[in-house]
């Protein structure tokens, strides 16, 4: 995972001031995945419900608001279909979001930050989120917003790590 962190820092091309900001190191349960995503396998001894509780508790601790929840698999079942468990959790710091969108309206497409819980056919649970390092490397933000972007990145990576590891 240190390789992912180091390569991400290099991709970001941040100034020395911003590089000095501490970067949260995501769980070893997490790997880069397709389509600019990070996929974290929830530890075997952590239930999906415990992973969700861990994420909510970590978000609350970080003062990062849970602003939305979509239980997609329940909707599929209500429509008469079949689906493994799939739930989307949306987290946000509205003040930072407003600043980012004011700088670059394209950020609105990423709001709010999402973490999706998906269970496979074997019952294993995974948490999936946007690889924010790659996204931020394309953003060319001013230094002040780079710092806020890193704060959001760190918070989301801390939340998904808490879920993957069941860190209550």
Image (tube, rainbow, N blue to C red):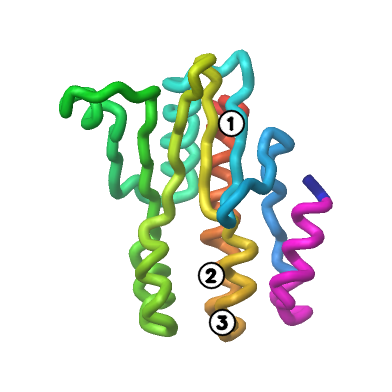
Q: Mark 1 highlights which residue? A: 164
Contact? badges 3 and 2 (CB < 8 Å): no
Query: Which SS class for mark 1?
Result: helix
x 37%, y 82%: residue? 102
Magenta stretch, residue numbers: 3-19
Q: Check residue 73 for magenta coloring.
A: no
Query: Whole-percent x and y of residue 120?
Result: 50, 23
Query: Which SS class for mark 2?
Result: helix
Q: Between marks 2 and 1, how big is the CA–CA gap?
A: 24 Å
For label 3, the crowd category at 10 Å Cα-Cα, with few meaning under 14, some 14 to 19 and many 20 or more, is some
Q: Mark 2 highlights which residue? A: 148
Closest to the observer: 125 or 92? Answer: 125
Above or below residue 13? Residue 157 is above
Above or below residue 90? Residue 50 is above
Query: Whole-percent x and y of residue 65?
Result: 36, 49
x 57%, y 25%: residue? 166
For label 2, the crowd category at 10 Å Cα-Cα, with few meaning under 14, some 14 to 19 and many 20 or more, is some
Closest to the observer: 122 or 57? Answer: 122
Q: Between marks 3 and 1, how big is the CA–CA gap?
A: 30 Å
Q: Is residue 92 left or right of residue 37?
A: left
Q: Which mark is residue 2?
A: none
Q: Nearer the observer, disc 2 or disc 1?
A: 1
Q: Mark 3 highlights which residue? A: 141
Q: Between marks 3 and 2, how big is the CA–CA gap?
A: 10 Å
Q: Nearer the observer, disc 3 or disc 2?
A: 3
């Amino acid at each position: 995972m240190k390789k992912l962190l180091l390569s991400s820092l290099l991709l970001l091309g941040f100034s020395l001031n911003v590089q000095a900001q501490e970067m949260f190191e995501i769980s070893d349960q997490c790997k880069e995945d397709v389509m600019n995503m990070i996929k974290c396998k929830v530890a075997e001894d952590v239930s999906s419900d415990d992973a969700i509780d861990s994420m909510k508790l970590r978000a609350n601790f970080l003062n990062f608001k849970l602003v939305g929840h979509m239980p997609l698999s329940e909707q599929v079942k209500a429509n008469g279909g079949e689906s493994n468990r799939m739930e989307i959790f949306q987290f946000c710091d509205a003040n930072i979001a407003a600043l980012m969108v004011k700088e670059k309206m394209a950020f609105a497409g990423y709001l709010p930050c999402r973490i999706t819980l998906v269970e496979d056919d074997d019952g294993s649970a995974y948490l999936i989120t946007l690889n924010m390092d790659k996204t931020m490397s394309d953003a060319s933000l001013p230094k002040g917003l780079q710092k806020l972007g890193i704060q959001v990145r760190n918070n989301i990576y801390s939340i998904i790590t808490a879920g993957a590891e069941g860190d209550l």
